[in-house]
Image: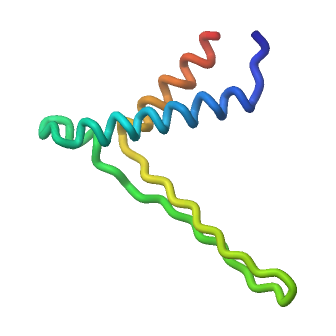
Amino acid sequence: MKKNGWLLLLFIGLGLIGGSLLAQWLQAVPGLSFLTRTTDLSWSPAADLIVLSYDLTLRLEVSLLSILTAAAAIWLYRKM
């Protein structure tokens, strides 16, 4: 199978989504709170150019579990 950058991005995205879902499901387990604690990363570029204006907000909630699953997704991609 031919490897390309889009497939790698798909694997990483699915890993992050899977990790965040696992983190939400495991929030009730007290012993795993270090894996499910999230950190918010946000970026909000905005511009008002007389003819065109935009406001974009990108927000990413990252937990240790989502980083681990993204790393596992990269490992799986490399094993293909």
Residue 27 in the image, given as x and y percentages of width and height: 22, 42
Q: Which quadrant of the rendered structure holds the C terminus? A: top right
Q: Is 7 displayed left or right of 23 in the figure?
A: right
Q: Is residue 40 above or below residue 75?
A: below
Residue at 34% across, 34% down: 22
Count of numbered labels shown in the rendering:
0
Residue at 73% across, 80% down: 47
Residue at the bottom extreme, as displayed: 50
Residue at the right extreme, as displayed: 51
Q: Is 41 displayed left or right of 64 in the figure?
A: right
Q: Which quadrant of the rendered structure holds the N terminus? A: top right
Residue 26 in the image, given as x and y percentages of width and height: 24, 36
Residue 7 in the image, given as x and y percentages of width and height: 70, 27
Q: Quadrant of residue 52?
A: bottom right
Residue at 28% across, 37% down: 25
Residue at the left extreme, as displayed: 30
Q: Quadrant of residue 66?
A: top left
Q: Is residue 4 above or below residue 27?
A: above
Q: How is the image coloured?
A: rainbow
Q: Is residue 10 above or below residue 34?
A: above
Q: Quadrant of residue 12?
A: top right
Residue 72 in the image, given as x and y percentages of width and height: 48, 23
Residue at 67% across, 28% down: 8
Q: Is residue 26 above or below residue 39?
A: above
Q: Is 66 displayed left or right of 55 in the figure?
A: left
